[in-house]
Image (tube, rainbow, N blue to C red):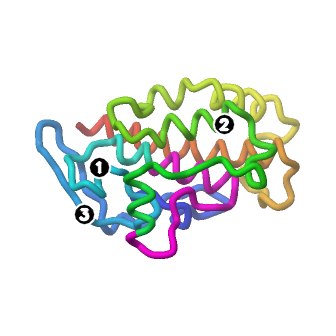
Amino acid sequence: MLLDKNVLLPRIKLIDFGLAHKIEAGVEFKNIFGTPEFVAPEIVNYEPLGLEADMWSIGVITYILLSGASPFLGETKQDTLGNISAVNYEFDEELFGHTSELAKKFISQLLEKDKMKRLTIQDALNHPWIKKMWSVVSSCSLQNEQLIHSKPKRLHRKSAEGYILLIILKWISFALGATRNL
């Protein structure tokens, strides 16, 4: 499962694949494990899983990276799972006041309850927010290598968003690599 705490900086690395499972074409897989805040509704409901569950996790991680808050966290594990089942989250003005509508739409399209309507890997890579942020990162005075080695607290807002974009693209490209193994 993809989690925000499983990212190592300054080089972006995905870690901790303890509960990971390779999805095989034509083989139904169900799972009830995972960190509650990050699991997709299909995990909560013990439905067959696919890469859509990872795309949900990317939505949760993007929400956290842009706001510093978890979208579904409740007082208890059951509250959290209930919030996920009901897709009960909001873009609180205090946390998302400076976040673009495109970014919020990107998150909303990843946090779609119906996994068939959720953004696919290709949809995410072609999303207008990702493309816009990529052009900002590309035109930024910092070279990508400098951006990767910088600490987020020292970056101005556009560069910090670029740093976030690099993390998101790393996760998406990881998921895309997984599709090549099917």
Question: Is tag 1's residue or tag 2's residue first in the polypeptide sequence?
Answer: 1
The residue drawn where x is 62% and y is 56% is 64
Which residue is the extreme one toward the bottom? 76
Q: Crowding near pointer 2: few (<14 within 10 Å), some, many (20+)?
A: many
Name the residue that disc number 2 marks. 103
Q: CA distance from mark 1 to mark 3?
A: 9 Å
Q: CA distance from mark 1 to mark 2?
A: 24 Å
Q: Report the quarter where the C terminus lies.
A: top left
The residue drawn where x is 58% and y is 35% is 106
**Amino acid tagged 1:** Glu
Question: Is tag 1's residue or tag 3's residue first in the polypeptide sequence?
Answer: 3
In the image, residue 76 sits, relative to residue 161, either above or below, namely: below
The residue drawn where x is 58% and y is 45% is 168
Q: Residue 32 has which mark?
A: 3
Q: Which residue is more in the foreground, 32 or 153?
A: 32
Q: Is residue 70 magenta?
A: yes
Q: Is residue 76 magenta?
A: yes
Name the residue that disc number 1 marks. 42
**Amino acid tagged 2:** Ala
**Amino acid tagged 3:** Ile
Range covered by the magenta-colored residues: 57-78
Q: Which of the 4 quarters of the picture holds residue 137?
A: top right
Q: Crowding near pointer 3: few (<14 within 10 Å), some, many (20+)?
A: few
Give the total of numbered labels. Answer: 3
Q: Report the quarter where the N terminus lies.
A: bottom left
Tell me residue 71's x, y (percent). Answer: 56, 56
In the image, residue 120 sits, relative to residue 48, either above or below, namely: above
Q: CA distance from mark 2 to mark 3?
A: 30 Å
Label 1 close to label 3 by CB (< 8 Å): no
